[in-house]
Image (tube, helix red, strand yellow):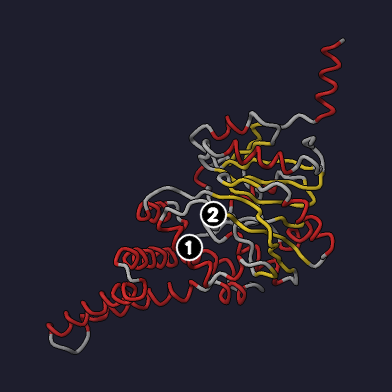
Amino acid sequence: MSTPTRPCRVSIVIKALNEERNVAAAIESCLAALRNIEGEVVLADSHSTDGTVREASRYPVRVVRLADPAQRSCGAGPQLGYQHALGEYIYILDGDMKLVPGFLEQALSFLAQHPEIAGVGGRVVELNQESLEYRERGERSLKLEAHRLPGQVDRLDGGGLYRRRAIEEAGWLSDRNLHSYEEFDLATRLRARGWKLWRLPFDAVTHYGHDAPPYQLLKRRWRSRYACGPGELVRASLGQPHFKLVVRGLRELRLYVAVVAWWLVLLSTPLWPLPIAQRAVSFALLAAAPLLAMAWRKRSWTRALYSVVSWNVNSAGLVRGLLAPRIAPSGRIASEVLHEPIEADEVDRKERNIAQ
């Protein structure tokens, strides 16, 4: 594979933040996947504080860095990479993922045969089965997340290969204001314009999620504003053609709204026209009801408590996201190019000069 500095067939954008331990494996998997395809790898770094950039710069890839770390978000990373990418097709990959050999060929072949398809994904193989968070997610995906099954889907969570032409019609790859749900946002903008998305019955990437304890992970998601994604997404879609698709497809939105309503009912109990003792009992029963219901459903107090705490964190994030200010997502993200690959013909010229 020669890494181009001019238009090519496929650009793989790796979004990364403090992925020093994983980025080499991610890059190597991408370079291997592009061995028989004219393409490039773009490492979009959200101003890592570890050795991510140093590790990535050892490879023939373009390394670009977010200029202002205060602008970090899940939406900023892919868009940063996209604005430096040159490919006709764009693949989005997390820095802790590895691309499975052969998937790009299958995806390109499928897109060539189906011009109405904007993007293609495959199976995301989750390797972390120890974390409570990922066990819960695995159970949900089997029951509720039809977009992880092969066939036409409403989103490509976990990355996918997209046509540049479709992205240009949608306006931008990912909304820099979003701290999560950036792939779903792209999907709804594409679908509102008549494009379709498809998941193939092949492994696309492997992923090993965070090893952090579940409550520490929730705390991290609040501090990083990941939990604000649903609210940010709803606000971004207000008055837009894809608003109905967002509300219809964001199934967890109903749960978070219900939790907010539950808070309001709890807060109203001191105003109920009942004796103080009855009001106190009512408050206690209402406060305990979700935990008791989940304990009965899951047959586990540990899992029930985690579910209820998670609901509350995400519901607070919904409110926070709805109130967050926005920056125009179509604007160019300030960045700097830290490393450029050397093309094969340039290497040949240098070798000839040395030989002379």
Residue visible at 12% across and 83% down in the picture: 277
Q: Nearer the viewer, residue 287 or 332?
A: 287
Q: Position of residue 322 (x, y in %)?
A: 47, 66
Badge 1 crowding class, 10 Å Cα cut-off, few under 14, some 14 to 19, many 20 or more, is: few
- Rate crowding at label 2 as few (under 14), some (14 to 19) or many (20 or more) other CA atoms within 10 Å: some
Question: Quick one: 191 or 103, which is closer to the camera?
Answer: 103
Please tell me which residue is depicted at 19% across the width and 89% down the height of the picture.
273
Kind of residue sitting beneath label 2: Glu
Q: What residue lies at 17% left-to-right and 89% top-to-bottom? A: 274
SS for callout 1: helix
Res 328 visible: no
Three-letter code for the amino acid on which mark 1 is drawn: Arg
Asked if the residues shown at circle 2 and circle 1 are in contact, with their CB atoms under 8 angstroms apart, the answer is yes
Residue on which the image places disc 1: 137
Residue 215 left/right relative to 337: left
Question: Which quadrant would residue 40 be assigned to in this image?
Answer: top right
Asked which secondary structure carries label 2, the reply is strand
Q: Is residue 236 left or right of residue 163?
A: left
* Residue 326: x %, y % from top left: 54, 59
Mark 2 or mark 1, earlier in chain = 2
Placement of the N terminus among the 4 image quadrants: top right
In this view, the residue in front, 124 or 238, is 124
Q: Residue at x 23, y 81 (%)?
A: 269
Q: Position of residue 4 (x, y in %)?
A: 79, 37
Q: Is residue 304 visible?
A: yes
For label 2, the residue is 126
Total count of labels: 2
Q: CA distance from mark 2 to mark 1?
A: 10 Å
Q: Position of residue 349 (x, y in %)?
A: 85, 21
As drawn, 265 above or below 168: below
Q: Does residue 168 appear left or right of residue 255 in this picture?
A: right
